[in-house]
C-alpha cells in the first residue's frame, strides 16, 4: 500500500477549523480508495506559538517539513501580531526556503454556484492563475532608514532573475499545454515597470518559441481586471508576477462565487522538497471560532494535494463529491448563500464520497 506523510499546519484564525475538516475528508478519501494511506502529523505553529515562544515556527521547522511528502496549511494572520510578521514568520518562511516557486490557483464556477457575473456559467469561467512564488515583489529586498524623521525612506525592491522568470513561464506553458484550450495569457505592467517587467516580456518571447502549440497573448494588469470581468471566456491559463497574480486571484475568487472556495498549491515541481497546499481565504478573524467557515477551499486544496501525490482517481473522487454538494445546493456555507455550519458541509461531502446522498 502506498503511504504518504502529510504535515498539517492549521495556523491562525479559521485555519484550524478548515484543516480539521479537510483532514477528515482526506482520511475518508483514502479509506474509500484503498490504495494508499495518509500519515498525518499536526504542528502547532502560528501566532499562539509566537506569543509563547517569540517565533512563529520551531527552529528546526524546515528540516522537519522536508521529511514530509506534502504540507497542508490553514492560514497565517492574527490581529495580535502585525501581518508582515506572521506572513514572513510562517507562510513565506516555508514557501521561500523550500523554493515552492509555482503557485497554482484554479478558478472556476462550480456546478450550482451563481457568480456575480450575469450570464456567465460554468463553461464560461475556467481559469488557472500561475503566480510566481519565490521572488518579484515578495523578494523581501528593501529597507527603511531615517525612521520617524522627515527624510524617512521606505523601499521594497522587486527582484526578477532570469532563472526565476524562465522557470515560472515554462511551468505555465506546460500547464497551458496540458489543458484542452492550450491558451496562455502573460500579465505584466511593462509599460510602467520598464525594467523587470520588460524583462518578463523578453523572456516570454524566447520561451514561447518552444511552445508553438500554445496560443499566447499579453495583457497589462490593469486591463486584465476588466477583461476578467467583461470577457471571462477569452481566458484560460494566466501567468503573472507574485503581487499581480495575488491581486488577480482574489478577483478571480470573487468572480467564482466566494473567496471561501478558492484553493492553492505552492508547488516545488522538482519534488525534492514538499509542496504546500492551502485555501486562499486567510485567517478570517471575524468569523473565527463560530464554526461557520467554508471548508470547500480547504477541500479543493486537498484535491490538488492528491493530484500532486500521484493519486488522480482519489483527487477526482473528492472533486466530484465537492461538486455534488455545490450542485445540490441544499447544504451550503453562508458565503455561498446557505446557512450550513462547517461540520455539516463536511459531513455532506463525506456522504457524497460514500455515495450516501446520491
Ligand atoms: C494569498 C494571500 C497572502 C499573499 C497574504 C495572506 C499575505 O493574500 O495567499 O494570496 O499575499 O500571498
Ligand atoms: Mg492574496
Image (cartoon, helix red, strand yellow):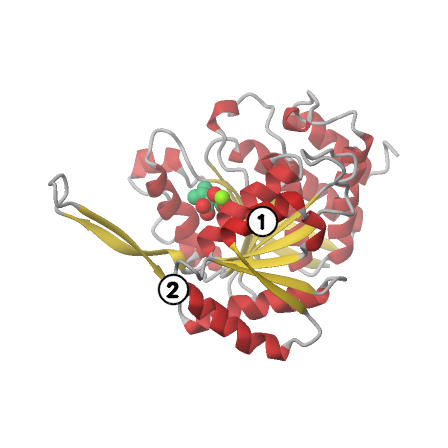
Q: Which is more N-terminal, label 2 or label 1?
A: 2
Residue at point 54%, 47% (across, down) = 248
In the displayed structure, 196 sits above or below 260; it is: below
For this orientation, the residue located farthest to the right is 358
358 or 30: nearer the viewer: 358
**Number of callouts in the render?**
2
Give the image location of residue 250, x and y in percent. 55, 42
Q: Which residue is mark 1?
A: 264
| Residue 23 visible in the picture | no
Q: Is residue 73 left or right of residue 30?
A: left
Q: In which quadrant will I find the C terminus?
A: top right
209 or 282: nearer the viewer: 209
Assign a secondary structure to mark 2: loop
Using the image, tell me which numbered label, if any, was put on residue 356.
none
Q: Is mark 1 within 8 Å of ligand 1?
A: yes
Q: CA distance from mark 1 to mark 2?
A: 30 Å
Give the image location of residue 104, x and y in percent. 58, 55
Assign a secondary structure to mark 1: strand
Give the image location of residue 338, x and y in percent. 70, 23
Q: Quadrant of residue 159?
A: bottom left
**Whether label 1 touches label 2, CB < 8 Å:** no
| Residue 355 visible in the picture | yes
Q: Which residue is mark 2?
A: 194
Residue at point 70%, 54% (across, down) = 234
Q: Is residue 4 left or right of residue 164?
A: right
In the displayed structure, 117 sits above or below 303; it is: above
In the displayed structure, 342 sits above or below 262; it is: above
Residue at point 67%, 39% (across, down) = 256
Q: Callout 1: few (<14), some (14-19), or many (20+) C-alpha neighbours within 10 Å?
A: many
74 or 33: nearer the viewer: 74
Residue at point 75%, 47% (across, down) = 124
Amino acid at each position: 500500500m502506498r503511504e504518504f506523510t502529510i504535515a498539517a499546519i492549521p495556523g491562525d484564525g479559521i485555519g484550524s477549523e478548515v484543516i480539521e475538516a479537510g483532514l477528515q475528508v482526506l482520511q475518508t478519501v483514502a479509506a474509500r480508495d484503498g490504495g494508499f494511506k495518509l500519515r498525518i502529523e499536526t504542528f502547532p505553529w502560528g501566532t499562539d506559538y509566537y506569543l509563547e515562544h517569540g517565533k512563529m515556527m520551531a527552529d528546526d521547522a524546515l528540516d522537519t517539513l522536508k521529511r514530509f511528502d506534502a504540507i497542508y496549511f490553514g492560514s497565517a494572520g492574527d490581529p495580535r501580531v502585525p501581518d508582515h510578521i506572521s506572513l514572513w514568520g510562517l507562510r513565506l518562511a516555508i514557501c521561500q526556503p523550500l523554493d515552492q516557486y509555482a503557485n497554482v490557483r484554479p478558478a472556476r464556477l462550480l456546478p450550482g454556484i451563481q457568480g456575480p457575473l450575469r450570464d456567465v456559467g460554468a463553461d464560461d469561467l475556467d481559469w488557472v492563475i500561475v503566480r510566481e512564488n519565490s521572488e518579484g515583489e515578495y523578494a523581501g529586498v528593501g529597507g527603511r532608514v531615517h525612521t520617524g524623521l522627515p527624510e524617512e525612506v521606505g523601499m521594497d525592491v522587486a527582484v526578477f532573475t532570469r532563472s526565476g522568470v524562465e522557470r515560472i513561464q515554462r511551468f505555465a506553458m506546460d500547464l497551458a499545454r496540458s489543458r484542452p484550450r492550450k491558451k496562455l495569457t502573460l500579465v505584466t505592467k511593462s509599460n510602467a515597470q520598464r525594467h523587470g517587467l520588460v524583462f518578463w516580456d523578453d523572456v516570454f518571447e524566447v520561451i514561447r518559441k518552444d511552445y508553438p502549440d500554445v496560443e499566447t497573448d499579453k495583457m497589462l494588469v490593469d486591463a486584465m481586471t476588466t477583461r476578467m470581468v467583461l470577457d471571462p471566456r477569452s481566458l484560460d491559463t494566466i501567468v503573472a508576477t507574485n503581487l499581480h497574480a495575488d491581486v488577480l486571484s482574489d478577483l478571480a475568487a470573487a468572480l467564482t462565487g466566494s473567496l471561501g472556495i478558492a484553493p492553492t498549491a505552492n508547488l516545488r515541481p522538482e519534488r525534492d522538497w514538499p509542496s504546500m497546499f492551502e485555501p486562499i481565504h486567510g485567517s478570517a478573524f471575524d468569523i473565527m471560532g463560530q464554526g461557520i467557515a467554508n471548508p470547500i477551499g480547504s477541500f479543493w486544496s486537498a484535491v490538488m494535494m492528491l493530484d500532486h501525490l500521484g493519486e488522480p482517481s482519489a483527487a477526482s473522487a473528492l472533486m466530484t463529491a465537492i461538486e455534488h454538494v455545490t450542485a445540490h445546493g441544499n447544504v451550503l456555507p453562508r458565503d455561498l448563500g446557505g446557512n450550513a455550519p462547517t461540520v455539516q458541509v463536511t459531513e455532506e461531502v463525506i456522504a457524497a464520497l460514500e455515495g450516501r446522498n446520491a
